[in-house]
Structures are given as structure tokens and as C-alpha cells.
Image (cartoon, grey):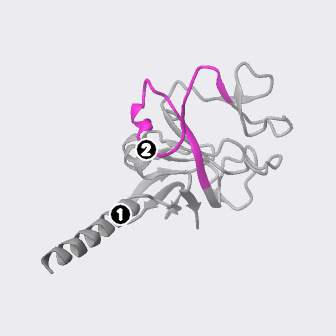
């Protein structure tokens, strides 16, 4: 009888432990504009809220290339890039993370066949250099905005990356401090969705 109780208790303890592990995986990050500050936001991860930066065009339901707006909607995190020499902590995640080399770019020309895709530099069409002089892309997660299917002119390079001091506006991305990114990365996977709401 005593052995039976002990086994039952162990099974219950194991179930509770498994539940605790699952609870530490974030399925949704909810982002909304900070009241009175359309280019700054609040990012809710579980019960914790972090400050973030949004696009210079605020949040838009009609995202267009070059408008600087953060798209309204749900975007899954696909994978990421990181600077191993600057942000080694980016390896502590379930996401597929690729080191950023000096020849990595991201095409931003709507008429180009590689629009909104990574490209190898030098590249003939206009592109963004991923290995930046600032630290914004030291940890840079790719969101599935306008990836599949890609629609011409609906926006490119919508990332979840590091913010500038004071949360100054992005070009349409969502950005958090390096400290916040370090806290979130171990909890993220390719099932995590960034949901931008109003």
C-alpha cells in the first residue's frame, strides 16, 4: 500500500514538472502601441510586459514597402540571425539561428526576384546589409510577414531585433533591449507568434 502511494505521488510530480516546462515556452508575444506614443510599444510575454520600439509609421493594417509601419496582424517567428562576436547568447534558443557574415544582405526591391529574401552581397538590387555597424541585428529574428506568399510592395525585412537607446522608431520592425531579448530567446520557437494588435 505504501509503495502504491509512493508511485502515484511520483507520477503526479512528473506530470507537474512537464507542465512547468511547457509553461516556459511562449506561444504568443502580444504587441500594442504605448498610449500616446505610436512608435513605441508594449510587448506582453505571458504575464510580463516589456517596452519595445515600433515602426516610424506606427501600426498599419495596410503595410506598404517604405512606409515605416509595423504590420497589424499575427506573424510567426521563422528563424533568426546573430552576431556571434557580439551576442553569443543567441545560441540559447530552440530557433534555427544563423551567424551573420559580411556578405549577408536582405533584398528590398519589390520588382526583384529575391524581394524580401536573404541575398549574398555584393548584390545588384537595393538591399539591407545584415552585418550592421550598430548592434540592432546582433540578434535578429525573421517574422513571416510577406514571406509566403510574397506580394510585391507589401513590405520587406520585418524583423524582431534589438532596439536603439530610448526606443527610437524602427523601419517597421519590433525591437527590444538586448536584456529583454536574452530573457525571451530561450522561451521562443518556430511556433511562437508575434501578434500586433490595436
Query: Residue under circle 2?
Result: 166
Q: Is residue 118 left or right of residue 44?
A: right
> Is residue 89 part of the magenta span, yes or no?
yes
Please state the horizontal and vertical placement of residue 39, each as a whole percent of the image. 55, 53
Please state the horizontal and vertical placement of residue 33, each as a whole percent of the image. 53, 61
Q: Is residue 112 above or below residue 195?
A: above
In the rendered structure, find residue 18 and report the number of the disc placed on it.
1
Q: Is residue 90 left or right of residue 99?
A: left
**Which of marks 2 and 1 precedes in the sequence?**
1
Answer whether labels 1 and 2 touch (C-beta < 8 Å).
no
Label 1 or label 2, whichever lies nearer to me, is 1
> Is residue 59 part of the magenta span, yes or no?
no
Residue in view at x 83 percent, y 46 percent: 152
Q: Is residue 177 left or right of residue 78?
A: left
Please state the horizontal and vertical placement of residue 180, each as a whole percent of the image. 39, 47
The number of numbered badges drawn on the structure is 2
Amino acid at each position: 500500500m505504501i509503495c502504491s502511494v509512493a508511485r502515484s505521488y511520483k507520477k503526479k510530480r512528473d506530470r507537474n514538472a512537464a507542465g512547468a516546462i511547457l509553461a516556459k515556452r511562449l506561444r504568443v508575444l502580444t504587441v500594442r502601441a504605448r498610449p500616446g506614443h505610436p512608435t513605441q510599444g508594449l510587448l506582453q510575454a505571458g504575464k510580463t510586459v516589456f517596452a519595445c520600439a515600433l515602426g516610424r509609421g506606427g501600426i498599419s493594417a495596410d503595410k506598404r514597402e517604405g512606409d515605416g509601419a509595423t504590420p497589424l496582424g499575427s506573424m510567426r517567428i521563422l528563424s533568426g540571425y546573430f552576431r556571434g562576436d557580439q551576442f553569443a547568447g543567441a545560441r540559447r534558443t530552440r530557433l534555427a539561428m544563423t551567424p551573420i557574415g559580411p556578405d549577408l544582405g536582405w533584398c528590398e526591391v519589390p520588382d526583384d526576384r529575391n524581394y524580401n529574401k536573404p541575398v549574398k552581397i555584393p548584390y545588384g538590387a537595393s538591399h539591407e546589409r545584415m552585418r550592421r555597424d550598430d548592434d540592432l541585428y546582433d540578434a535578429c529574428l525573421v517574422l513571416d510577414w510577406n514571406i509566403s506568399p510574397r506580394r510585391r510592395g507589401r513590405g520587406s525585412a520585418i524583423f524582431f531585433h534589438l532596439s536603439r537607446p530610448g526606443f527610437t522608431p524602427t523601419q517597421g520592425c519590433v525591437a527590444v533591449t538586448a536584456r529583454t531579448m536574452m530573457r525571451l530567446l530561450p522561451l521562443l520557437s518556430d511556433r511562437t507568434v508575434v501578434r500586433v494588435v490595436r
